[in-house]
Image (cartoon, grey):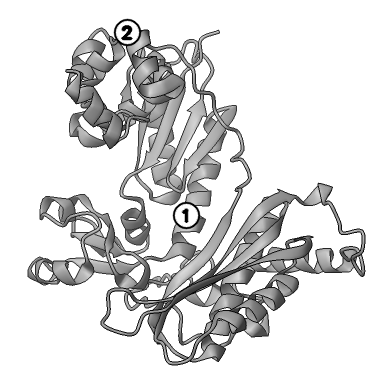
Amino acid sequence: VKTIFALVDCNNFYVSCERVFDPSLAGRPVVVLSNNDGNVVARSNEAKALGVPFAAPAHECAPLVKRHNMAVFSSNYALYGDMSQRVMSIVAGFAPEMEIYSIDEAFLSLGDLAGVDPLDYAARIRETVRRWTGIPVSVGIAPTKTLAKLANRLAKRDPACGGVLALDGRSDLDSILDGVATGDVWGVGPRYSAMLARHGIRTARELRDASDAFVRKRMTVTGLRTVHELRGRSCIELEGAAPPKKGIVSSRSFGRPVVELAELSEAVASYTARAAEKLRCQRSAASLMCVFVSTNPFRDDPQYYNIITRRLPAPTADTAELIRHARADLERIYRPGFRYKKTGVFLSEIVPADSLQLDLFAAAEPSEERARLMATVDIINARLGRGAVYYAAEGVRKAWRMRQERLSRRFTTRWDELPVAVAG
């Protein structure tokens, strides 16, 4: 049975989230900045048209921002994460199978769409998401994931498409692929694109028509799958659930230099708590922990970097135990007299939580009460917002936290930041 795939992708997602709760931003150039308000990570179409480059340092864009009265926001991860969940829950209702590919993208397996016009179906998805969340999306439909990704890209770039494009059965598919550079094909990175150009292959059509032997030799079996997908043969299946991470990093740069061990300790405890939450979310436990500290290599200050690795007595996802080890290790590598820019933890050798290999000589097995406590903390924070319940070791004021001087409210996850509607 022939299967049709769709890729649903939110347009300028971070910017769109900000616009949902501030209609005055419609039509105005908007940019969103990265951690510590350092670089541009999202731009509205208006900001792109004015020449704001992606990843440009914020200070370099300041004259352009002022000249064109651009709205500038710090990254509001709580808001973006919640809006992403709302969009994905709606999209999931349009297909029996879905793969969440990123915070703003999802693949759908639509079956054979017998008797249904693909463009009409894509338009229904787009309109439903817009009406229920306010987020604009583009939808690409095709017989393979690679072609669906390409269809979505073209639908987003060409206003004539109205945000939707179906490539299935198109008589002009050759000319469409002629207009796509190999570097714009999903799965073909810059290195492969440069190699293909040296062999006279510069468009998606030329790549599709390349011989299997050439592609297998130059791009391995993975590249050959991409070529088969360009030919309309589905080779890349949906991943219903993301595989558990093999390593979890939790780290942020500080909003200002940190010199005191007490503040570093708070930061390490906070990052460790976040890493432990991620472990439990994927029902895993970690066997190895690394703690690191570093100064700012871009400043003319004395430089110091160090990392320490600890094998845990037994695999665990218990926040309290992980914080205890992390703070002890931090004390071992901390050196006074330095202006620290960053610290963090890395958890690895991750195993399923339901099949732990315990230490024969351990003093005690993991406590059921501790597991229930961790589950309760996760439930409370999921309902009331991250940080509703936290360990005192994480600090209260957290003066070290990253700089977010242009942060909008967390409209959907904080009771005291809910939008207010005034009638009359």
Could you tell me the amino acid type at mark 1? Answer: Met
Alpha carbon distance from label 2 to label 1: 44 Å
| Residue 164 spot, x, y in % from top left | 32, 29
Do tag 2 and tag 1 residues touch (Cβ < 8 Å)?
Answer: no
Q: Which mark is residue 370?
A: none
Task: Tell me the residue at 31%/57% (across/down).
Answer: 15
> Residue 349 location in percent, x, y?
67, 52
**Residue 150 picture quarter:** top left
In the displayed structure image, the side of residue 357 where residue 189 appears, left or right: left
Crowdedness near tag 1: few (<14), some (14–19) or many (≥20) residues, C-alpha within 10 Å: many
Horizontal placement of 142 versus 154: left or right?
right
Q: Secondary structure at mark 1?
A: helix
Q: Nearer the viewer, residue 293 or 131?
A: 293
Three-letter code for the amino acid on which mark 2 is drawn? Ser
What is the x, y in percent for residue 69? Answer: 13, 69
Q: Is residue 163 visible?
A: no
Q: SS at mark 2?
A: loop
Q: Residues within 10 Å of mark 2 (few under 14, many from 20)?
A: few
Looking at the image, the residue that sits furthest to the left is 67
Count of number-bearing discs: 2
Which of the pair 54/350 is nearer the observer?
A: 350
Q: Nearer the viewer, mark 2 or mark 1?
A: 2
Quadrant housing residue 99: top right
Residue in the foreground of this view, choosing between 292 and 241: 292
Query: Residue 305's spot in the image, x, y percent?
Result: 44, 74
Q: Which mark is first along the chain, 1 or 2?
A: 1
Query: In the drawing, what numbered circle is on residue 83?
Result: 1
Q: Is residue 328 left or right of residue 47?
A: right
Residue at the image position 73 percent from the left and 62 percent from the top: 317
Q: Which residue is mark 2?
A: 211
Image height check: is 198 above or below 172? below
Q: Residue at x 14, y 71 (%)?
A: 62
